[in-house]
Amino acid sequence: MIAHGFFPFLATVDFETFFHRAILVAATALVWPLLYLTDTRSMADLQMAPNSRWVRDLFAGILFSVIPLLCCGVLFIAFHIYSLRHSFAWIAFGKTVAASIGVPVIEETFFRGLVLGVLLRTGRQYVSIFATSAIFSVIHFLKAPERTSTIVTWTSGLNSIAHSFARFGDPMSVAAMFTTLFLIGWILADGRLRTRSLWLPIGLHAGWIFAAGAFNRVAHRGILELPWLGKNLLVGIVPLGIAGLTWVIMRSWLRYVDAGKV
């Protein structure tokens, strides 16, 4: 399509990034058929309800994920684990902002909205959360390395799928990333169940993407200390602890606001 003058802006996007996002969009497009097949007719069937305080929940989620992660980043710079870059890539930062807006809406609608909602109909809450979090984690590994398809052809998608398991060649990195993503998935599911809506998990998800992406634009890693710290602020034991802190803050805040309703 690019070669024939359609959507020329896509020429600047790595094919693997485009293909991964296209799969998410395709999965979202299949939501309606799946809802029909599972006889889901309303939000109540997915254990969700309209949220009149959606703005509060959205921005609370953003703050709960952004502040601890950026504070962690500042400490990394102070201890020379990361160092500041000499220039700031505004175009790359714009892509980070766009990703922090679009990706959470798509992924939360699909994973915490649809997949978790359908599984909850089995009556097994913790099994449903476990399965959803595991799927959420594994899906993030099924992505070919960047520049796998430098020349895009009609079979580039198949080539991307063929190389999608490349990351499993590094067991330590996979274990560190899977554990963090699994906990993040569980936190997002917990926020969704406690508020019966997607706004809090969307805020949390957006905050994590923005904080990790923005920090990588202003600083670069000096050393790789697996399993303590991986390639970014969302991989490793330390980020796992930061995610756990966000979970504690989220739960404490929800208990506080719920107590105010009494």
Image (cartoon, rainbow, N blue to C red):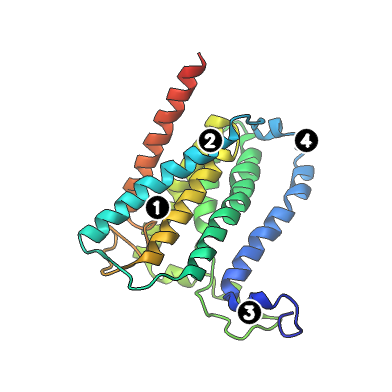
Q: Name the residue located 64 percent from the left edge and 32 percent from the top edge.
A: 48
Q: Earlier in the sequence, mark 1 or mark 4?
A: 4
Q: Which mark is residue 11?
A: 3
Q: CA distance from mark 3 to mark 2?
A: 37 Å
Q: Name the residue located 60 percent from the left edge and 41 percent from the top edge.
A: 116
Q: Earlier in the sequence, mark 2 or mark 4?
A: 4
Query: Residue 86: where, in percent of width, then height?
Result: 33, 73
Q: Disc 4 marks which amino acid?
A: Arg
Q: Residues within 10 Å of mark 3 (few under 14, many from 20)?
A: few
- Can you tell which of label 4 and label 3 is closer to the viewer? 3
Residue 27: name its quadrant: bottom right
Q: Disc 3 marks which amino acid?
A: Ala
Q: Which residue is mark 4?
A: 41
Image quarter of the N terminus: bottom right
Q: Which residue is mark 2?
A: 57
Query: Residue 210: where, in percent of width, then height?
Result: 47, 55
Q: Disc 2 marks which amino acid?
A: Asp
Q: Which mark is residue 179?
A: 1
Q: CA distance from mark 1 to mark 2?
A: 26 Å
